[in-house]
Amino acid sequence: MPLRFDDDAEPDWLKLNQANWEERLPLHLDSDLYDLTTLMAGMGNLHPIEEEELGPVDGLNILHLQCRFGFDSLSLAQRGAKVTGIDFDRGAIEKAASLADELGLADRTTFLAGNVLEADKILDAPASFDRVFVTWGTICWLPDLKSWAQVIAHFLKPGGWLYFADHHPIVSTFDDEFATSPDMPTFFWPYFSENPLIDDAGEDYASGVQLKNGDLHEWLHTTGDIVTALLEAGLTIAMLREHDGIPWKAYSCLVEGPDRLHRWPDKPWLPLAISIKAVRP
């Protein structure tokens, strides 16, 4: 797996990442990892962590950042929310809008294409949202958490709040690829790392297909980085939880439970997911 930690990353990280995700779209839509069955049946489900923490959304105005092709956006709309989704993959946005039409949710959903760090230029709706929703595999693709947090604060109503859930930052520090034992992953990426990880292997994680647009730039943001960015944007941290389970098999040794979360096989050695509620006063 060709990887490097580069302190001289190419300036076109956004263009490279965008091309990579655009190429992945048809592969993911055809993958069991992104099963649309429940969504198309009118019962789109979130992961257990969000289900427990997000609460009722009926009647709420929600902004979903990095919404991909809208599975979670549409699941929230099926629960009565009005949802605006933003993602930089235009093809994914077009698919989200198409699914909304098919599901009869076009009147409760809006999907916009663009860079999430410039969302205030894409959407003219300051202080308009009851919730901002950001989950699973999102901020690792962004070099600048300060701008990300400012975007969130810009769109939240007073009293509105961000719901954020993702793999715990410490998950990125380990990898199976370099493990000396089949039972546990090993150290891979320093937790305190300012340089991006550049992966030019070009293999899609969902399908195993080799991609033509293989280069990806990824950043490790610590828990402190995330919390500090939100606080500096003027938000108040109302909840921070670490979880012993994660929605996907981050390491080969993890075991899936009846709640569809994957956990360490013997003891909860380290947190696998993190969730945060951050309120605009």
Image: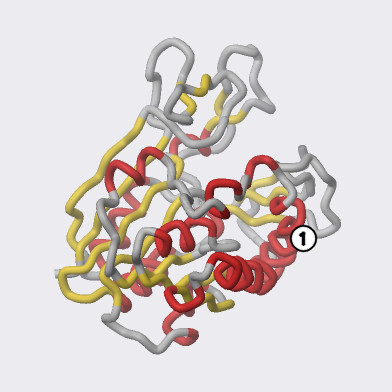
Say which residue appears at 29% left-offset and 41% top-offset.
Answer: 52
The residue closer to the viewer here, 97 or 158, is 97
Q: Is residue 168 above or below residue 71?
A: above
Task: Kindly identify the residue that appears in the image at 25 percent across and 66 percent down.
Answer: 232
Q: How many marks?
A: 1
> Label 1: how many residues lie within 10 Å, few (<14), some (14-19) or many (20+)?
some
Quadrant for the N terminus in the image: top right
Q: Is residue 244 left or right of residue 160?
A: right
Question: Residue 102 appears at what percent x and percent y?
Answer: 60, 68
**Residue 273 location (% of width, % of height):** 40, 38
User: Quick check: 41 above or below 126?
Assistant: above
Q: Percent position (x, y) of residue 179?
A: 64, 20
Indicate whether 29 appears above or below 274.
below
Query: Which residue is found at the position 47% from the left and 62% from the top?
Result: 73
Figure colour scheme:
secondary structure
- Does residue 88 show up? no
Left or right of 214, for residue 112: left
Tell me where residue 245 appears, x and y as whole percent: 41, 30
Q: Is residue 244 left or right of residue 248?
A: left
Is residue 148 visible in the rendered image? The answer is yes
Residue closer to the observer: 80 or 68: 80
* Quadrant holding the C terminus: bottom left
The amino acid on which the numbered mark 1 sits, given as a three-letter code, is Glu
Residue 188: quarter of image: top right
The structure residue drawn at horizontal position 78% and vertical position 54%, both measured from the top left corner, is: 214
Q: Is residue 122 left or right of residue 95?
A: left
Could you tell me which secondary element the residue under label 1 belongs to?
A: helix
Which residue carries the number 1 mark? 23
Front in this rendered view, residue 106 or 23: 106
Quarter of the image holding residue 141?
A: bottom right
